[in-house]
Image (cartoon, grey):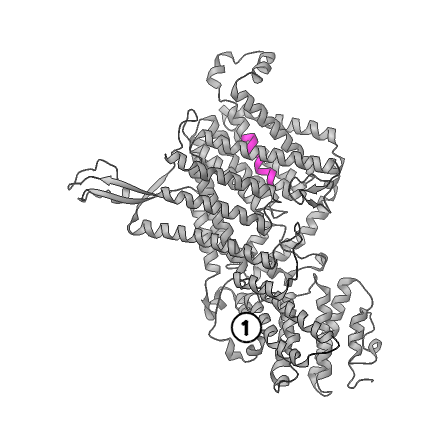
Amino acid sequence: MKNNRELSPLFIFLVCIVVAVLSFGAIHTWAYTIVFLGVIAASLMMLKGTVVRVDTPSTPQGSSPRIPLPESERDGRPRKAGPRWYLKWVTTDLDPLFFFFIALLLLQMLPLPGSLMLLISPDSKIAGDMSQPAAGALNPQNLTGHWYTIAPYLHPVRMSLIRWTVYGLLFFGLVRCLDSRKRIEAAIVTILLLAAFDTLYGIMQTYSGHGHVWWFKLKSYRQDVSGTFLNRNAFAGFLEPAITLAVAYAAGLGDADREQTAPSRRRSLAKRFLAFFSENPNNLKRFLIVFAGGVMGLGLILSSSRGGIIAVTGALLMMGLFFYFRKSERRKGRIILLLFGIAMIFAVHAGLDYTVGRFRFFDESMQFRGVMAENALRLFKDYSFAGVGVGNFGHAYGKYQDPIHKKYYVDYAHNDYAQFLAEAGILGAILLLAGSGWYIVRTFRIWRKRSDPFAVCLGIAPFAALFAVAIHAYSDFNLHRPAHMMALIAVIAIGYAALHSKNGRHRNRTPHRQRMIPLRPWGAILLGCAAGLTLWCGVWTARHFVAEAYCNTDYNITLNLEENPPVESVRKAKSWNPRNAAYPFKLARALIMVRDLRMQGRIQDPEGWKQSHGPIIAELEQAIRLNPWNAEHHVRLGWEYSYLFDRPDRLSRWLPAADLCMDRAAYVAGGWPQYPKLHYDIGNYWTMRTRSLGPDDPAREIAWTRAAWHYRQGMELEQIKELPKDVRTYIGYFFRDVPLLFDFSGSARRAPSKKGN
């Protein structure tokens, strides 16, 4: 009965993996929402079986009960007869890693006093101070007594907590469900069929010239096989664990009927060939797995992903070494050669010129990505202890971005090691090494003791898959895609279940290690925390999806979602997810557009102009309070402060607050290589301030120097020799002789004291 109860969750888990891969790698909100809710639902279905009742007879002093009790209760004390409730907790070697990272994410979101934050992460304290409204921050006393979090922007860390929890639920759920060889093989076949289909689909799309992934037409990578992913590297990242699983499974089937063939080991080659294609079910499985592995190998080569090819080659080399150092498995290396041979035969026929040609630019590409990694390490140095917050890299990186990447918004470092250090810090690195080291050492010890070919061969698959992903992570960011993580977790769970399975036929069950925890009180507390965290993830996943349906802020390329929805839609999105800083900023921008439209008509509304500043400023201040790293937020707020002409304290409060906003923007954005127009915008502001200051005010020359610096930055990034026409027109509103003020060669002249001079 228990076995049938866990069949439905297993089916849901496998369907979620299939959906994640086929829906562009589940990188879009609609895709990962479906997948995450499916995993959460299947996990909640399994919670019912974790609470068990044990009917225990009375136990006299010093006697043993008829039904074994947990070790924690075997103390010889007398107990009354009656039912006792326990929490049955399945333990794995990945438990420490999972709980370590849950603790790290919670720590990054925990409010701490400002004095303590100065010791832990001074830059987080600076970012926290910048999150305070600039109009109030002019008084230093207003910055004292605040509590800040290690991660200045909490929304990405919350989303990372949801993802990490879902990945943990997927692993623990698969381990519990894969309790027999039959189920293990069903999961393997599902993944391999999925990978083979994805490869054949990609080959068909590429070589037919259609160039689509479902309904989306690819604009780049059209010469590369990418399956149902949007680029070659993402496709190769999925094939890496799938290929290692195919090799391990084919090797594990190689000796499934060893006892039957032992007396005839010295058969001729012809008899062996006929036996391979005989009606033996294991031979049929081997043939299908070898064929699928060959197709996947062909897809990997035709993807032209240099990192993927190198990663899989390294993983297969590692598997070969593992086989070699076990005498009983040395001949399994032939499986690897056979798969490579089939892939190369197809690849040579299809043509390898393009794939081989891409390796000629390998050094140049690595240098281009290496700059991102170096700058990510600069970010790590500023937030070295506990990181900038898992998921915050793309928000904090603008200050460190190199002009060589001026055409890109860098969301990922293209080096998961450097990005992980920047996001998790030294503390996260220690937890990662401790958790993964615990898993690797304990799993390797078990692997060395096993002799069953099925367990030995599939027990290698997690090591090989992790090794391949680790190689590719040096130049890419596949671990940030849900489909890749789910495929990798599935391979690890399959290897773990196979390694702990009993010898024999598929009807034998896998003896999972379990802990029987008394339900009162610790079992109830642990169950409540697990159920509460699972439900919290489900609720906020759904709320995030609804909010994104009203106002899109996530990665959007395959759906034609409106980038700038109307005011009411943004307000609804904000009500569903008030932690996302993009919603109040988009709401402020929508309010600005409505205001500007009113002022552009024949009948202008000056009173409406005055009344519009309050709501817009409130939204911008909230956006900065949530995410102090966005330079555009600070610039827009500075301009809104400068529009308060009718305020009596305009010169003493609002203009100095606007100056502070521009200083904050320049600090968090660095060189602003990804958005040259913002340089012109901030330059225009300082041009306006140059005119508003008195002729004898020393700050006048400083303001003009700042304006000229930002103008030069914009010109250098756009590689132009003259200021854009609209910028020159704006300067002309304040100074008549614009060419005399700026000679367009990079040098600025002194600002005149009066217009016309």
Q: Is residue 245 a member of the stretch shown in magenta?
A: yes
Chain part drawn in magenta: 238-248
Look at the picture and state if 315 lies above or below 425: above
Seen in the image, is 443 located left or right of residue 337? left
Q: Is residue 471 a member of the stretch shown in magenta?
A: no
Residue 530: x and y, percent? Answer: 40, 50
Residue furthest left as drawn: 61
Name the residue carrying label 1: 132
Location of residue 732 by image quarter: bottom right
Would residue 85 be seen by someone viewing this image from the given angle?
yes
Seen in the image, is 131 located left or right of residue 300? left
* Nearest to the observer: residue 746 or residue 164: 164
Residue ID at (46%, 74%): 145
Q: Which SS does the magenta portion mostly show?
A: helix
Residue furthest front as drawn: 603
Residue 255: x and y, percent? Answer: 50, 22
Please state the total of marks drawn on the protein image: 1
Residue ID at (78%, 86%): 754
Would residue 436 be seen by someone viewing this image from the given angle?
no
* Nearest to the observer: residue 582 or residue 753: 582
Look at the picture and state if 546 lies above or below 467: below
Residue 244: x and y, percent? Answer: 57, 34
